[in-house]
Amino acid sequence: MMSRVVISSSEQLGQVLQGARKIAGLSQADAAARLATSQSRISHLELNPETISVAQLLALLAAYDLDLFVEPRALDDKPDDKPDPKPGTTLSDAEIDRLEW
C-alpha cells in the first residue's frame, strides 16, 4: 500500500507514477493493456510527465487503484519569508463553484 505522497514537480509525478505501477504489480505492458494504449506510451508518460493531460493522469491513477486529493499546504510547509495571503484572497466553495474552467 502506498502512503500519502506530495508531488511538487513533473519529475516527481513521473517517479510516483512509475512507482505506483510497480506497487500495483504491473509492467508497462500490463498498464498499457488496462488503458488500451501502447507500452511505449506508458513509458513516454512516465519519462515525460509534463505531457500528461488531466484525463490521462486520472486514468493512470484509476488503473493503479489510486485517488487524487488536493488540499491546502500545511502551515509548516510555508517558508518563513513568504508573506501571508491578503485577506479576502481565499475563495469560498460557492465562489469556486461559479468559476468557469
Image (cartoon, grey):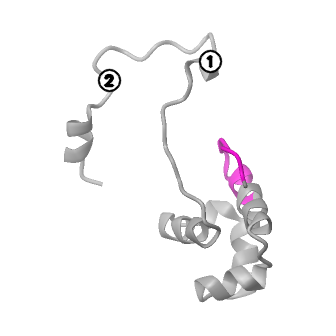
**Residue at image point 77% right, 79% down:** 28
Instruction: Choose mark 1 or mark 2, whichever is in front.
Output: 1
* Quarter of the image that includes the C terminus: bottom left
- Asked where in the image residue 31 lies, by quadrant, the reply is bottom right
Q: Main secondary structure of the magenta part?
A: loop
- Asked where in the image residue 94 lies, by quadrant, the reply is top left
Left or right: where 81 falls relative to 44: left
How crowded is the residue under tag 2: few (<14 C-alpha within 10 Å), some, or many (20+)?
few
Disc number placed over residue 89 in the picture, else none: 2
Depicted 80 relative to depicted 9: above or below:
above
Place of residue 1 in the rendered image (x, y in percent of width and height, measured from the top left) = 73, 55
Residue type, numbered disc 2: Thr
Depicted 89 relative to depicted 8: above or below:
above
Place of residue 36 in the rendered image (x, y in percent of width and height, measured from the top left) = 59, 89
Place of residue 27 in the rendered image (x, y in percent of width and height, measured from the top left) = 80, 78
Place of residue 15 in the rendered image (x, y in percent of width and height, measured from the top left) = 77, 56
**Residue at image point 76% right, 66% down:** 47
Left or right: where 11 falls relative to 94: right
Residue type, numbered disc 1: Asp
Give how far apart the Cα atoms at labels 1 and 2 are.
20 Å
Residue under label 1: 76
Depicted 36 relative to depicted 94: above or below:
below
- Range of the magenta residues? 2-14
How crowded is the residue under tag 1: few (<14 C-alpha within 10 Å), some, or many (20+)?
few
Q: Secondary structure at mark 1?
A: helix
Disc number placed over residue 96 in the picture, else none: none
Q: Secondary structure at mark 2?
A: loop
**Residue at image point 76% right, 85% down:** 29
**Residue at image point 61% right, 73% down:** 63
Left or right: where 79 falls relative to 56: right
Q: Earlier in the sequence, mark 1 or mark 2?
A: 1
